Image: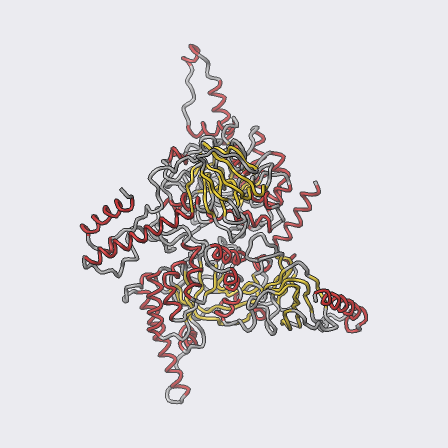
Amino acid sequence: MNRFMSRTSIILASLLTSVALADYAPDVEAWNIESAPPQATVVVRNATVWTAGEQQILEQADLLVRGGKIRAVGADLDAPGNALEIDGTGMHVTPGIIDAHSHAAIIGGVNEATDISTAQVRIEDVIDSESINIYRQLAGGVTAINLLHGSANAIGGQMAVIKMRWGANPEELLFQAATPGIKFALGENPKQSNWNNDDPRYPQSRPGVAQIIDEKFQQAADYQRALENMPEGRRGRNVVPPRPNLEMDAIVEILEGVRKIHSHAYRADEMVMLINIAESFGVTIGTFQHVLEGYKLARRMAEHGAAGSGFIDWWNFKHEASDAIPYNPALMAMGGVTVGLHSDNPELARRMNLEAAKAVRYGGVDQHDALIMITANPARQLGVGDRTGRIEEGLDADFVLWNGHPLSVYSRVEQTWVDGRRYFDYQADRARREALEAERRELMAMVLDEGEGGEEADESPAGEETPGGLIGYRASELAHDEFCHAQDFGFTHGGHVHAIDFRSGE
Amino acid sequence: MSTITRIANTLAMAAAAGAMLAGPGWVGTAVAQQSPTALVGATVHPVDGDPVENGIVLIEGRDIAAVGIGIEIPDDAEIIDVTGSHIYPGFVHPLSALGLTEISSVAGTVDNTEMGAINAALRVEVAFNHDSALLPVNIAGGILTTHTVPSGGLIRGTSAVMNMEGWSWEDMTIKAPAGMHINFPSGAAGDGENDDLKKIESVLDAAQDWHKAMQAFEAGSAPRPARNAQLEALVPLLEGEMPLFLYAGKEKEINAALDWAEGRQFERVILVGGPDLQYVAERLATEDIPVIFNGVYSMPTRRWEAYDMAYAAAGKLFEAGVKFAIGDGGGSFGATNARNLPFHAGSAAAFGLPKDAALKSVTLWPAEILGVDDHLGSLAAGKRASLIVTSGDPLEPMTQIQRVWIDGEEYDLGRSKHRQLFERYKGRIQAD
């Protein structure tokens, strides 16, 4: 049966029984799909292909995809007879965008803001696979995101990297190849600077944050030693093993190098501090997140091996963001750092190509290098650089078709593919919304025939309204790191001055 | 033609250089009589007309003396060759907190909101910090004029159109008061008994009464009414001497706000709203209500709406014939990145708004809506010479803003803290 018709009859039945039109709940599942799109054999012909790899930008090139992998890229490729042919004339192909800092699909618990270290908690336990953000970000060309804890505590918890396999369950979303990681945080947030605090906990200063991280590493090293010193076999029977400790287990993984630190950090001093402590335990940091003053220690970061994942131009929203400059990515790259750009915001995540474009504006980063900052480099930072982030034979078929230059403000995404499956198609999206609109009109007509007033038809009670004027959203879809910046995603609506703003004035 | 112009320019340049060397007036004068400046060689985008290749912008004093081709350059003019570049008018930010705020999380630096519901007598220009670090940074992004507004509460006070550059707020004020700001309470849609709306109405009624009492006093038929700052401040609004900036978010609220404003017979209403404005586009066009549209970059209002609902909104307003300016939502956080305003307009152009309309929506149209288009918003003789020289289309984030003139004088972009830190640390990174 046609799925729209079947849904129509279900909604209609409920409408006619509950009757009141005010109860009409628009179909919030409009963008859902019932099963994963097929893994296609597809060839894109005659496009401009931005490889984000050694081949740079290929003009009038073809891309061949089969079995979820990129099989070939180059001129005049032979394709199997059954391959879906896409005419890429005038279009650009890029790798899928990878957002290394997101909270866009987390059901509660972005911050486990209790103890100063909550290394034991895991994002993979609270992934919201139904977050509309997944679909909307696919529409912006995003194919993988790193779901991170917030920044309330020095050691926040274990992250989860997912692929944007819209419609899949949380387990299927997980990008298993990603290197395990853990969120750290430094500065104003873990020291609880920006909110009223009736019940403060230690620490309240940057030296305190440094001290507690050092101490946690010491404890973990002791715990690790105790585990290693457990005698084998019969001799172990008379020795009490250390009490299992999930927090210490996670920190031991850091010390062993199997779990990478991704640390929220703004100021240069605190980044030097974390490098200093990490090196004293033989640990190499994965990334500094936000990394606002990364340009002040670019050489030190490169020498240590820490990558930088930042905003392009957020600044001065907190005191510790005073010296944030949009030239940061250009300068860090100049200093030898692997630089990525991230969103930290489900709305911004839909247009990361324009954040990369700003790296061209500020400091003159080469256009292809700027694209690498939202594709190949974040992939490397998450340990999946050999799986995704570039258009290259053998890599996952995670790619985007743009209707113009991918860094141009006038371009938009035509199609987004993940694992060789077309999860977003602009034309299909338009067809779906037209079908939805037709269905809606049909329902309205039927209900109005029943004699119920139609005045309130536009506003449905289907969901809570946020102070910023957003309606029907799941809490997880608006989730953010409330300790990082008091965002309100309705900020632009009307004049309800909820600006991404600490002082909404209301 | 272009060769002839070039020769003429070269001759004029030589003449100007000679004049500078020879003219006794130039030596040792602290405040010399400013000679005209001619920007030559660029593609000039006047905004209210077609772009002109190899055009000239002639600046005399504060203002533009002439724009176009075949313009006679005075002998004493300084000729600046910007061949290969593009010249546009500076962007006019239609609604921001610039000048009133520094760091949004540090209360001591935030002055764009006040406590209380009724603040009609607030004037924001008096707190405009001419040395805010945000100003040079945003000038470097091409924002040369800001409409700075009060926020918070119901009747919020008066706003001001401000120059982004100057030595004190008095010098920098282009127009104040620019309008009265009233937030239409979201609960008032469909509820005539809404407490907040009643509060607004009772204050407006009292202001009307106060005004009548004052008129009676002036006519000599009654004693002088006691001064009342809040009520007095509302008289120019009631008399139609200043426009009303009316804030409403969702479709239902916008309609209710328009009904209400119609009922109260405000002379000139400018609606400030979000992406839902598109659903009221026909009405806005019919009733000739200009709008400030915040929120190209915002989540669709309703979860079930199309992903591009907010991107496409400006295009829908344009199609319907609504006069609009594109804003960024303002606020303290927003003020730091007011420089991104042109990109909001560019993104709207990716989803249905014609490119030339996108450019107007952040230059000429905000100037018109704010009533400063005799000074700003396009490159035309008689308007202020506040312009940007760019490497290309300024709605593209990749484009670089190379030079800036404000009120006829070149602005030192090196004053941007961001450029200073860039230069300083670039030197350090390269030195190692």
Q: Residue furthest bottom?
A: B220
- Front residue of this view, candidates B298 and A109: B298
Task: State left or right for residue B14 relative to residue B317.
Answer: right
Residue A159 visible in image = no
Q: Residue furthest front?
A: A81
| Residue A313 image position (x, y, % from top left) | 55, 50
| Residue A168 image position (x, y, % from top left) | 37, 36
Location of residue A247 (image quadrant): top left
Q: Residue furthest right?
A: B22
Residue B341, placed above or below residue B217: above
Residue A421 visible in image = yes
How many numbered markers are drawn?
0
- Front residue of this view, candidates A72 and A268: A72
Q: Quadrant of the C terminus of chain B?
A: top right
Residue at horizontal 65 percent and vertical 56 percent from the top: B414
Q: Residue furthest top?
A: A234
Q: Quadrant of the N terminus of chain B?
A: bottom right
Location of residue A238 (image quadrant): top left
| Residue B289 image position (x, y, % from top left) | 41, 69
The figure's colour scheme reads secondary structure
| Residue A104 image position (x, y, % from top left) | 42, 43
Task: State left or right for residue A108 relative to residue A416.
Answer: left
- Front residue of this view, candidates A160 and B155: A160
Task: State left or right for residue B401 relative to residue B177.
Answer: right
Task: State left or right for residue B380 relative to residue B315.
Answer: right
- Front residue of this view, candidates B279 and A218: B279
Residue A491, placed above or below residue B178: above
Residue at horizontal 50 percent and vertical 72 percent from the top: B371
